[in-house]
């Protein structure tokens, strides 16, 4: 109610202000118009009286005064004093030349402190009009000698003939402050008469405004409840058909839609809050999983790098094994060739022994020497037997090592170190076989030399032929055994060479496979690095989503708090 009265007061004040402004404008215009009319009337009366009194003035006297006869000024002042004596509203009369020099004054002007010969203030425009038109006129309001003045001017012609020149001006002053007094006396009644109906109109207007705005009180109370968040009230029931009635209808529609929207916002905000909680929890789990994946990928990266290094080292080892296998194969081939040569030499030796038997008949003279030689040959044969025993052992061991090497070769893809051990043993046995073959060659050479000696001795001793023959035959049998052993060793060495060739091919296949494994390991490492980078970017994106979900949850909670400020039911 207080706000509604305040609105009525404001509207009434505005209307009253407009009315008062109109009254003020009208009053000022009326005052100005009356003031100008009074001033005009006073001016006409002034220059009328001044014009009449010019008949009392003798122009010849004025000409004499202008010529310098100042004695006539007093007489002329007495003559013009008649006007003020009969018109008390005037302040004084005087005669001036066109330049404003005082020629004669009455008693009232003299009392104002003005003397003959003084320069009197004049309205230059009015004087100019008078001289041009030769008609009386009046001045505007001006201040001179401590008084506001309105002066009427009348021309004094030479010889009183209007056709002659203006030799002086008759002037009568009027106190200008009286103009305002008379103007106010004229307009104050009209103003009072105008203000009363305006005040009555203003009061009536305020009453009508108050009556028209009374329904606004209900709207204000209703709107205040809505503003405070209370939407439980009923609808406004105003039966007016004007703008206020339309306002109440629109406000009812607004509250209805507002209540509906707030209900939907409340329900949606609760659903969004629950969804955001679930999404926040989910994103937290995703972030943890992504972080764990990142850690695992870092481990995989490290493992991939380690795997690449292991593959590279394995590849280097396999290359070294392949190189050493090729060397062993080359040495085995060389050993085979030497064994073949040894076998050929043993066959040649056997043929030589056969020839020696045929020559035994010639050894009768040298039997004693043959006995000694045979003794030496027997010792050498024992040494050959020992060497052959070693060769046999080496052959067996080599065969076993070749088998182990084949087994290890099949596992070389995973464990390449075992093959290196077997290869080393094979290399040692191959060296021993080579040394034994060399020793066999030397002994065979010695046997050949001794056999020659025995043959030579046999020719000298017939008695020792049989014994020598037997011994030579025995030596031949032993030599055949050696030849057979050498043949066996040669065959085994050839088989070992073939096995080494196969092993070398297998190792080369393993090396080629390891190169492919190394390439795949590099690809896996690069892929793992790329996946790790993508995982980091994904983790960052998920963290941003989590931050946004937390912000959305906070905004939803804030929205719920805002909605709770409204009472919907």
Image (spheres, grey):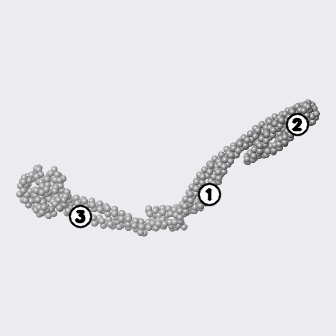
Q: Position of residue 241 (x, y in %)?
A: 45, 63
Identify which residue is drawn at 40% across, 65% down. 7
Dot 2 crowding, Cα within 10 Å, few <14, some 14–19, many 20+: some
Camera-near label (1 vs 3) is 1
- Callout 1: helix, strand or loop? helix
Q: Distance between the residues labelled 1 and 3?
A: 97 Å
Camera-near label (2 vs 1) is 2
Camera-near label (2 vs 3) is 2
Dot 3 crowding, Cα within 10 Å, few <14, some 14–19, many 20+: some
Decide: is 94 above or below 375: below
Comparing 17 with 215, the one in front is 17
Q: Where is residue 428 in the image (x, y as percent from the top left)?
A: 77, 43
Question: Which residue carries the number 1 mark?
Answer: 288
Q: Tell me the quarter of the image containing the C terminus.
A: bottom right
Decide: is 194 above or below 312: below
Q: Horizontally, is 426 left or right of 109 in the view?
A: right
Decide: is 324 above or below 186: above
Nearer the N terminus, badge 2 or badge 1? 1
- Callout 2: helix, strand or loop? helix
Q: How far apart are marks 2 and 1 (CA)?
A: 98 Å
Disc number at residue 184? 3
Comparing 547 with 277, the one in front is 547
Identify which residue is drawn at 76% across, 38% down. 331
Nearer the N terminus, badge 2 or badge 3? 3
Disc number at residue 372? 2
Identify which residue is drawn at 10% across, 52% down. 167
């Amino acid at each position: 109610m207080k706000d509604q009265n305040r609105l009525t007061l404001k509207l009434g004040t505005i209307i009253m202000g407009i009315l008062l402004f109109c009254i003020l404008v009208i009053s000022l215009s009326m005052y100005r118009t009356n003031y100008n009319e009074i001033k005009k009337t006073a001016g006409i009366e002034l220059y009328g009286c001044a014009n009449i009194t010019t008949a009392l003035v003798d122009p010849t006297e004025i000409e004499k005064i202008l010529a310098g006869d100042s004695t006539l000024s007093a007489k002329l002042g007495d003559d013009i004093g008649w006007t003020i004596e009969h018109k008390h509203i005037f302040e004084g009369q005087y005669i001036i030349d066109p330049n404003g020099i005082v020629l004669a004054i009455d008693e009232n002007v003299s009392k104002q402190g003005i003397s003959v010969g003084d320069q009197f203030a004049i309205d230059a425009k009015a004087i100019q009009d008078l001289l041009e038109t030769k008609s009386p006129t009046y001045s505007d309001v001006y201040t001179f000698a401590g008084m506001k003045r309105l002066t009427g001017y009348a021309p004094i012609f030479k010889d009183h003939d209007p056709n002659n020149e203006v030799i002086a001006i008759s002037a009568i002053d009027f106190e200008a402050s009286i103009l305002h007094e008379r103007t106010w006396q004229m307009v104050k009644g009209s103003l009072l008469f105008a203000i009363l109906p305006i005040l009555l109109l203003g009061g009536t207007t305020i009453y009508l405004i108050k009556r028209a705005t009374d329904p606004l009180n209900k709207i204000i109370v209703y709107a205040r409840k809505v503003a405070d968040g209370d939407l439980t009230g009923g609808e406004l029931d105003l039966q007016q058909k004007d703008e206020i009635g339309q306002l109440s209808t629109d406000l009812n529609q607004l509250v209805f839609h507002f209540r509906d929207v707030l209900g939907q916002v409340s329900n949606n905000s609760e659903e969004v809050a629950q969804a955001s909680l679930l999404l926040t929890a989910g994103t937290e789990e995703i972030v943890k999983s992504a972080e764990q994946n990142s850690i695992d990928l870092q481990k995989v990266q490290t493992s991939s790098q380690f795997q690449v290094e292991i593959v590279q080292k394995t590849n280097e080892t396999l290359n070294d094994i392949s190189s050493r296998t090729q060397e062993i194969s080359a040495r085995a081939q060389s050993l085979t060739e030497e064994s073949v040569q040894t076998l050929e030499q043993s066959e040649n030796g056997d043929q030589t022994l056969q020839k020696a038997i045929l020559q035994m008949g010639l050894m009768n003279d040298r039997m004693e020497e043959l006995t000694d030689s045979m003794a030496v040959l027997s010792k050498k044969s024992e040494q050959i037997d020992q060497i052959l025993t070693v060769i046999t052992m080496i052959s067996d061991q080599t065969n076993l090592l070749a088998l182990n090497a084949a087994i290890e070769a099949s596992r070389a893809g995973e464990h390449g170190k075992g093959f290196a051990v077997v290869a080393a043993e094979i290399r040692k046995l191959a060296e021993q076989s080579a040394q034994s073959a060399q020793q066999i060659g030397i002994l065979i050479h010695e046997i050949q030399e001794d056999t020659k000696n025995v043959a030579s001795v046999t020719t000298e001793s017939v008695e020792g032929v049989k014994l020598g023959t037997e011994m030579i035959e025995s030596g031949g049998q032993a030599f055949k055994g050696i030849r057979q052993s050498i043949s066996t060793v040669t065959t085994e060495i050839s088989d070992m060479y073939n096995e080494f060739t196969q092993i070398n091919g297998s190792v080369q296949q393993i090396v080629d496979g390891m190169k492919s494994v190394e390439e795949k390991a590099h690809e896996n490492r690069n892929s793992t690095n790329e996946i790790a980078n993508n995982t980091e970017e994904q983790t960052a994106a998920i963290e941003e989503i989590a931050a946004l979900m937390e912000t959305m949850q906070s905004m939803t909670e804030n929205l719920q708090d805002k909605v709770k400020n409204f009472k919907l039911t």
